[in-house]
Image (cartoon, grey):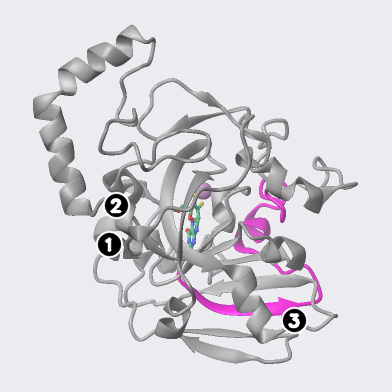
């Protein structure tokens, strides 16, 4: 398996969306059929995600092309709006993301409330991450953001802090899904402090070099690529350093199905379906799911000596 360093691509190399679509449409007209035939001859299934010249610079470190902006922004899980993945974009369109503040506190030396602009002032990086949903679909997404570790370093966790708890926005006026009585709102999540300090844990402010669209968690969300997607919380308003493992929405709903760790693992199955394979959005043939979603080299040390079966 190829792991190694996550390549970071400067914004300037990310094709702006307008150009991207135009070139894509152009390619379809100019060389689409020829390219498809060529790929078929090489034994490659021509799907939406096949690397074409205009997407070539946007691939993950395993060589798989990024999903399109359209796919990433029109197939979403965001239960505060709706459980209909294709309906989130429309319902979230007018979600107000300014003003926005994130309160960082709990067991820290320097509790602080950040305005969203102060968070955008952290040095931003491009990171192309796989996102593997617990429902067994996945995407490759070019995020913009900064390591959560940099924010935590500023507030200085106390030695008693062992976990990080995330609380997200509850805007009843704009989030119709909050009316659902089946979920213990607000959407909450958590990480162990050493997981949160891992360089892969990213606070995300953008997508494809642009501001994050509301359906993907604007103005700020988390991306924890080695864990199932539900750990990557959207619309964060509060980050607390705590001593005990925090309660989380999905674990509260069904503890036997959604563990606190939720590390991607092809050998630990959901009680109602296998996690051995996944469907990459845009592809027809299923892929093998990788341990820690392909990020073992960066994160396996976090779980040394721990059973991944009982701590699922
Ligand atoms: N606040 C909030 N964050 C959330 C969710 C949600 O319903 N509410 N869904 C999670 C799930 S299940 C997944 S798979 C990812 C999906 O992120 P995406 O829609 O940007 O692909 O967001 C996660 N973050
Ligand atoms: Mo998910």
Circles 1, 2 touching at the beta carbon (< 8 Å): yes
Q: Residue drawn at (35%, 67%), measured in percent from left and top? A: 176
Q: What range is drawn magenta here?
A: 235-262
State whether residue 77 appears in this view.
no
Labelled disc at residue 17: none
State whether residue 15 appears in this view.
yes
Q: What element does badge 1 sit on? A: helix
- Spatial CA distance of label 3 from label 1 is 37 Å
In this picture, residue 197 sits left or right of residue 203: right
Outermost residue, top side: 41
**Which picture quadrant has residue 78?**
bottom left
**Disc 1 marks which residue?**
91
Q: What element does badge 3 sit on? A: loop
Q: Nearer the viewer, mark 2 or mark 3?
A: 3
Labelled disc at residue 157: 3
Labelled disc at residue 87: 2
For marks 3 and 1, the one nearer the N-term is 1
Q: Nearer the viewer, mark 3 or mark 1?
A: 3
């Amino acid at each position: 398996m190829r792991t190694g360093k996550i390549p970071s691509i400067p914004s300037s190399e990310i094709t702006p969306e307008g150009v991207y679509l135009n070139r894509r449409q152009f390619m379809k007209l100019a060389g689409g059929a020829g390219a498809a035939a060529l790929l078929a001859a090489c034994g490659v299934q021509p799907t939406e995600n096949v690397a074409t010249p205009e997407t070539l610079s946007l691939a993950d470190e395993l060589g798989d092309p990024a999903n399109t902006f359209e796919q990433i922004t029109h197939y979403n899980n965001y239960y505060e709006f709706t459980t209909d993945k294709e309906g989130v974009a429309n319902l979230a369109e007018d979600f107000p993301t300014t003003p926005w503040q994130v309160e960082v506190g709990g067991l820290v030396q320097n509790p602080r409330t950040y305005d969203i602009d102060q968070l955008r002032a952290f040095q931003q990086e491009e990171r192309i991450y796989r996102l593997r949903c617990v429902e067994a679909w996945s995407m490759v997404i070019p995020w913009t953001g900064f390591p959560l570790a940099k924010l935590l370093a500023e507030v200085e966790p106390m030695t008693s802090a062992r976990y990080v708890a995330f609380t997200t926005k509850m805007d009843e006026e704009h989030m119709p899904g909050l009316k659902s009585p089946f979920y213990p709102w607000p959407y909450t999540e958590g990480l162990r402090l050493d997981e949160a300090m891992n360089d892969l844990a990213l606070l995300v402010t953008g997508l494809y070099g642009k501001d994050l669209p509301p359906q993907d968690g604007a103005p700020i969300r988390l991306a924890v690529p080695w864990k199932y997607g539900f750990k990557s919380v959207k619309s964060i308003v509060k980050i607390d350093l705590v001593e005990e493992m925090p309660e989380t929405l999905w674990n509260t709903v069904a503890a036997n199905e959604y563990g606190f760790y939720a590390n991607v693992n092809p050998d630990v199955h959901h009680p109602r379906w296998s996690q051995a394979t996944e469907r990459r959005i845009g592809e027809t043939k299923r892929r093998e799911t990788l341990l820690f979603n392909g990020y073992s080299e960066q994160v396996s040390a976090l779980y040394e000596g721990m059973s991944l079966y009982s701590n699922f």
